[in-house]
Image (cartoon, rainbow, N blue to C red):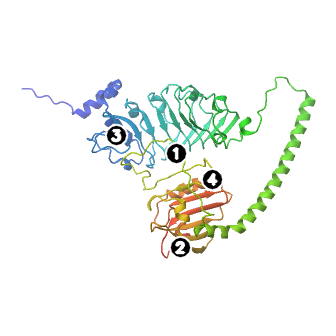
Amino acid sequence: MAIYFLPKPPFFLNLFLIMFPWMVKAYMTDADALLRIKQSLNNPEPLDSWKLGTNPCDDLLTWVGIVCNKGIVTNLHLKSMSLSGNLDLTALSQMAGLRIISLENNSFSGPIPGFNKLGSLKALYLSINQYSGEIPSDYFTDMTSMRKIWFDGNKFTGKIPSSIAELPNLVELHLEDNQFSGTIPAIGQRSLNSVNLSYNNLTGEVPPGLAKFDASSFEGNPGLCGAKFGKMCDKVNPRTPKSTEKSSKKALRMEYILMAVTLLILILMIVGIYILRKRRKRNSETIGIMEGNPEGSVGLTICNISKPEAIPGQNGFGTGQKTLMARKKSTGVDLMLLNNSKGVFRLSDVMKAAAEVLGNGMLGSSYKATMSNGVVVVVKRLKEMNLVDKNGFEAEMMRLGRLNHPNILTPLACHYRKDEKLVIYDYIPGGSLLYILHGKH
């Protein structure tokens, strides 16, 4: 009797898939695709629940960051997991039911991946990463189902892709805090209800289709013009001016520049005098606030923006941190919570707490505050950061909040006003906040 030795199944399958790559889609399940995506990451430890032999849609052993519908993976939420690397887009493309991808607040970098190959996507959240470079103008051409685009807080450059204007069902578009330049394409879908293009390098006139959004959606772009910004746009004159007209316009332009420089110097002098006067009153005002003075207290304004809901079993930051970011939508003052190890609290809780002055240091004054729930914190008032704007301040606080070192005490929260910056730390009995901050022990 002849005996035949067959290759082992894994080898046979691998050889078959190499020879017939068009069969990959029929063979690869959602679990297989997700495991390949996990392998493509530099630090897959936060995805330990993704294990071979288990079902990502199991009701009892659900994989972290996965949302299913009738046994099919529809949402991939990997927010705030300190992930990096190059996602396996081939594996992603095999997940036919995938509709939402959220990679917010991670460390992905480089050019934007080819998510446009996933034509069925409805929402793509890439906020607060390190993606950079230009996005091709036709990137969204085949993504006709796309409804929500959140690319804010990256380093994208070049023009805003014109194919965004061709998305028929677009509802939300957030491209703020990047380095986009040039004019805004003719975006103006009636379905749009949330747009933010602020803090880029955009120029020219805002398209008529975006006129319904207020000026805060475009602030931080000094090159924009129109009635919304109180600056008329230059009209193109088809007639070639004569040499005398050119010289007179150049002289007039120089006069305007000199007038503007003189006015700027006067404004700076006035601002400097105002700042000096405010600094003299700051110590007494801050002590009044820390002792619970109702007239000096401020509230917390949280902007309710539509982003993916938290997934059960997913704890925000991989290190136990949770960021609650607030933008000014009214006259209120916002608070940014950087670490939830002491629970969630409002600025009003700190303001009403019994305060004790600890002293003045190189960085500013410090106060010990005991809140009504028994939590004791230290509130440090930064006196050397008055010229830092809100974006810079919050960025530095977020970087400090992500640090994890035995010699560095990370902050619990921070508070920004134009003339007031507070950082809230856990209280260490007998310790020195200054030494802890700088690691001198």
| Mark sitting on residue 304 | 1
**Place of residue 246 in the rendered image (x, y in percent of width and height, measured from the top left):** 89, 32
Which one is closest to the eye, mark 4 or mark 1?
1
**Place of residue 155 in the rendered image (x, y in percent of width and height, measured from the top left):** 58, 43
Can you identify the residue that label 4 sits on?
A: 390
In which quarter of the view is residue 215 placed?
top right
Give left or right: position of 66 versus 61.
right
Q: CA distance from mark 3 to mark 2?
A: 46 Å
- Could you tell me which secondary element the residue under label 1 belongs to? loop
Whichever of callouts 3 and 1 sits on the residue coming sooner in the sequence is: 3
For this orientation, the residue located farthest to the front is 294
Give left or right: position of 439 versus 390.
left
Three-letter amino acid code at the position of disc 1: Asn
Three-letter amino acid code at the position of disc 3: Leu
Whichever of callouts 4 and 1 sits on the residue coming sooner in the sequence is: 1
**Place of residue 190 in the rendered image (x, y in percent of width and height, measured from the top left):** 57, 28
Three-letter amino acid code at the position of disc 2: Ser
Quarter of the rendering occupied by the N terminus:
top left
Whichever of callouts 3 and 2 sits on the residue coming sooner in the sequence is: 3
Q: Are marks 2 and 4 in contact (CB under 8 Å)?
A: no
Can you identify the residue that label 3 sits on?
A: 35
Vertical comparison of 147 with 263: above or below: above
Q: CA distance from mark 4 to mark 1?
A: 19 Å
For this orientation, the residue located farthest to the right is 244
- Could you tell me which secondary element the residue under label 4 belongs to? helix
Can you identify the residue that label 2 sits on?
A: 432
Q: Are marks 3 and 2 in contact (CB under 8 Å)?
A: no
**Place of residue 357 in the rendered image (x, y in percent of width and height, measured from the top left):** 58, 74
User: Which residue: 48% across, 71% down?
Assistant: 428
Q: CA distance from mark 3 to mark 1?
A: 34 Å
- Could you tell me which secondary element the residue under label 3 belongs to? helix
